[in-house]
Image (spheres, rainbow, N blue to C red):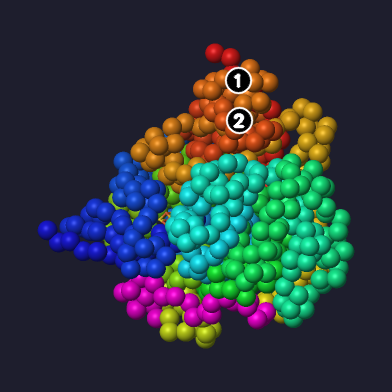
Amino acid sequence: MTTTQVRAACPLDCPDTCALLVTVEDGVATAVKGDPDHPTTAGVLCTKVARYTERTYHEDRLLYPLKRVGRKGEGKFERISWEEALDTIAGKLTAIAARAPEAILPYSYCGTMGLIQGESMSSRFFNKLGASLLDRTICATAGFTGYKYTVGASVGTDMEQFQNAKLLIIWGGNPIASNLHFWTRAQEAKRNGAKLIAIDPYRSLTAEKCHQHIAPLPGTDSALALGLMHVLINEDLLDHDYIANYTLGFAQLRQRAQEWTPERTAATCGITAQEVIDLARLYGGMAKAGEPVAIRANYGVQRVRGGGMAVRNIACLPALVGAWRHAAGGMQLSSSGSFPTNKPWLQRTDLLKKIPRTINMTTIGDDLLRPASPDFGPAVEALIVYNSNPLAIAPESDKVMRGFLREDLFTVVLEQFQTDTADYADIVLPATTQLEHIDAHTSYGHLYMMANNPAIAPMGEAKPNTEIFRLLAAKMGFDDDCFKESDDQLAAQAFNTRDVRAVGFDWDALKRKGWQKLNMRDAPFAQGGFFTPSGKCEFYSAQMEKDGLDPLPAYVPPYESVASNPALAARYPLAMISPPARNFLNSTFVNVKSLRAAEGEPHLDIHPDDSAARGIAAGDMVRIFNDRGSFVAKARVTDKARAGLVVGLSVWWKKLATDGKNANEVTSQQLTDMGRAPTFYDTLVQVEKVSA
Ligand code: SF4
């Protein structure tokens, strides 16, 4: 027997981007383990990816091209050849492109985070075609934008420093479920005497293990940050030298913060004034004493109307107290802006003959149902879905489904499994998993460039996304040289070696070693050097003013809350959030039996006061509903959900859920204050017991 170990990288939408070691015995991958030598992975994987072979060799893997023979959504398909599949797709797209190329829409996100199997050959293909552009906003753009206005780029505290912090505020995230290797360092910090505080409307697994849990109402984090600023300023818990040298607009901020007394903050957030005061005193006091204080902000805070502003406000705090002076202080939202990637070259934006319209992936429900009009342009006639499962993950699911049901819509889905979305395809193309293809990766949690070597041959007739778009390009007569480049050639130019951060990057060496750390200094803003127009942390942002936004930190109330929309709340009085279930990663892994078994079935966590008021007992089946739709889950009566809040851990495949529906039946397509992002946690619902 020949046994080898192959260096790989986790492709999933998780900040940790683990380095993997894949054991291959006679061409079969038998184990996937964390690389013990990679500093952030440290030999540990989450339970999901530790079972990656179960997923790769799953009996339901799609192994051949398929064409639909039943009704859309019915899931009836028959095997066809690659030749027939490619001819059919190329024929359809060529005909549509001759009339209206913008009627063709790619739909993709982070099913893989890889630079190569994500947006490289696919983007080249759609750019050449002149297809509509997709605004890929479904996760991070609100927070990204708010952070960018304030700090300048998604750069922050190095994950490898958090164990040295003395105060760690985990704001809007549940790292045990979705940032495991940060959590390892947080625990180390705890053992070293650090205090851990979780800010989250829900008492998550992480919040339970922190020293303190503060539970603001969803959508009120920006108010909490303003209240903290008020106390920091009024009690002079500030780093005046840092503020004077490295920030912009303190005088205006001081004035704005006066509006946010602890009492007003408490009333807005549904917490006590003392919680606001104590947190500010702890944070500012420790910073003043020279201790490293750090904030790990995550995307929970930004899935509401004011999500961009919430991240902006939080990002002002480290500059006020001078927390950036320490390598283990400051804040991390994402490290993605640290990587000098060569995306314009990978995606060949120069192939665009003109800038086509852009369709927001968050509003796919509305946009698939939109007729042609002078404002919108042509109706969407062809949809090519890869690395995404919009039927499960896009908001206002009923509209998404009605769009996919359109008989005049031609839908192609590149997939590893017959997902909810694949059921609506006209043609399904089998795609490889991470063990079967090459890729190069950045991370949004750590600072390593990563290589993924293929460990095994593609299963069945599955092909990498790149190869599928290469073949389609050839079928459509696109003869530019860029369509002939191999995955190795693409990966070799994934990073910009003229940038000092990627100095020494060499693809062959990266493939052998598996990773290479960016050349960056610790404590990136210890002496200012922010990436904003002024080079300072911008409490006042002229760019925001230009963009029609409040240039100062502000509170943007939710679209849907008891305080901001009492008329709606009279009918739908409970706020609902739908954070990630521990055993799923967005909608990936829901079809892996062992992981689904660990989750059990769709649950709704509801506070005892709210369940009692509705005659609901633990274990009852309940219907969660609003004007947009409904879904059924089993009630878990628990004070983990604060009163007035219900929590449905997600994202279930609809066809594997209790009633064929999931939490996105009730979420809305409204967008955030900035970044054009979704507002999944800005949702009012009512809950009722389902009669037997
Ligand atoms: S999902 Fe995250 S924690 Fe799990 S293996 Fe991938 S990168 Fe690591």
Q: Residue at x 58, y 60 (%)?
A: 167
Q: Residue at x 54, y 28 (%)?
A: 636
Which percent across, then down, holds residue 598?
40, 37
Q: Earlier in the sequence, mark 1 or mark 2?
A: 2
Q: Are marks 1 and 2 in contact (CB under 8 Å)?
A: yes
Where 496 falls versus 656 (above or below)?
below
Which percent across, then down, holds residue 122?
51, 63
Circle number at residue 616: 1
Where 616 falls versus 470 (above or below)?
above
Q: Is residue 520 magenta?
A: yes
Packing grade of label 1 (10 A; few <14, some 14-19, many >=20) is many
Query: Is residue 544 toward the left or the right of residue 329 in the image?
Result: right
Instruction: Please tell me in which quadrant of the rendered image residue 474 appears.
Output: bottom left
Residue identified by numbered label 2: 606
Residue furthest toward the top? Answer: 692
Which percent across, then down, holds residue 307?
70, 53
Which percent across, then down, holds residue 551?
82, 65
Q: Residue at x 76, y 39 (%)?
A: 561
Query: Can residue 93 be seen at all in this image of the molecule?
Result: no
Quadrant for ligand 1 reads: bottom left
Q: Residue at x 28, y 59 (%)?
A: 22
Magenta region: which residues?
A: 506-529
Query: Can residue 246 be seen at all in this image of the molecule?
Result: yes
Name the amino acid type tagged 2. Answer: Ile
Instruction: Please tell me in which quadrant of the rendered image residue 59 appears.
Output: top left
Where 534 falls versus 632 (above or below)?
below
Circle number at residue 468: none
Query: Is residue 603 toward the left or the right of residue 400 in the image?
Result: left
Instruction: Please tell me in which quadrant of the rendered image residue 237 appears.
Output: bottom right
Q: CA distance from mark 1 to mark 2?
A: 9 Å
